[in-house]
Image: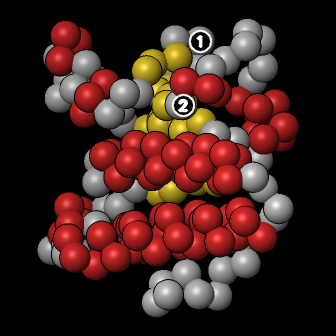
């Protein structure tokens, strides 16, 4: 492994992946071949760490599938200027200047809806989750959710990166 050889936890792998994606994604000035290598190593590193945690093959496959879905969702919007992407548990929350990228029906580009994000009216943020992590009701604030599941922010890039 070239990129993830020093990672020992899933959190380290995810954090490094986010950093590498911001630096190497083709939409951000990187190249496709490098990004494909990063994606392949990410899946492998995740599987190795999960296997070391004594998970069954079925549990490892499920973790890989969820990680892949979150990675794809992040990649599809990471180049949007002015937004903040936050990972809270197995959900992604997007805030900031999202209005220009809302659904086409509302006059936006449709980037967020195309990436399967939904708008949470009460919290006024966009969110993404895989099917198995649907909400089970509740009126928790974002602070309560962050406290329960943990939170990690993926800052979107600025236009300076493209110059």
Q: Nearer the viewer, residue 72 or 101?
A: 72
Q: Residue 133 at what x, y percent from top left?
A: 64, 27
Relative vertical location of residue 119 with respect to residue 80 in this rendering, above or below: above
Q: Is residue 10 left or right of residue 96?
A: right
Residue pictured at 35% horizontal, 61% vertical? 157
On residue 13, which mark appears?
none
**Label 1, residues with CA under 10 Å away: few <14, some 14-19, many ≥20:** few
Query: Quarter of the image containing the C terminus?
Result: bottom left
Q: Position of residue 161 (x, y in %)?
A: 26, 71
From mark 2 to mark 1, how far is it between C-alphas? 17 Å
> Is 28 drawn above or below residue 141 in the view shown?
below
- Scheme of image coloration: secondary structure
Secondary structure beneath dot 2 equals: strand
Relative to 133, is 116 on the left or the right? left
Rendered view: 141 above or below 30: above
Residue 109 screen position, x and y as percent = 17, 29
> Disc 1 on helix, strand or loop?
loop
Is residue 78 placed above or below 27 in the rendered structure?
A: above
Residue at 65% from the left image edge and 71% from the top image edge = 48
In the foreground, 144 or 32: 32
Which residue is at the front of the view, 65 or 150? 65
Q: Residue at x 83, y 40 (%)?
A: 147
Q: Which residue is mark 1?
A: 122
- Of all residues, the one furthest to the front in this rendering is 57
Residue identified by numbered label 2: 129
């Amino acid at each position: 492994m070239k990129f993830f050889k020093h990672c020992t936890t899933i959190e380290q792998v995810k954090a490094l992946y986010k950093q590498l994606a911001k630096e190497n994604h083709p939409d951000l000035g990187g190249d496709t071949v490098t990004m494909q290598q990063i994606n392949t190593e990410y899946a492998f590193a995740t599987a190795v760490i999960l296997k070391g945690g004594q998970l069954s093959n079925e549990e490892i496959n499920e973790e890989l599938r969820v990680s892949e879905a979150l990675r794809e969702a992040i990649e599809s919007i990471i180049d949007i200027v002015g937004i903040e992407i936050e990972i809270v548990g197995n959900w992604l929350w997007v805030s900031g200047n999202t209005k220009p990228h809302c659904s086409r029906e509302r006059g936006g580009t449709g980037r967020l809806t195309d990436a399967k994000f939904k708008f949470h009216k009460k919290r006024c943020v966009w969110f993404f989750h895989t099917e198995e992590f649907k909400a089970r009701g509740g009126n928790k604030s974002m602070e309560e959710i962050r406290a329960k599941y943990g939170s990690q922010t993926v800052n979107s890039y600025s236009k300076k990166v493209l110059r």
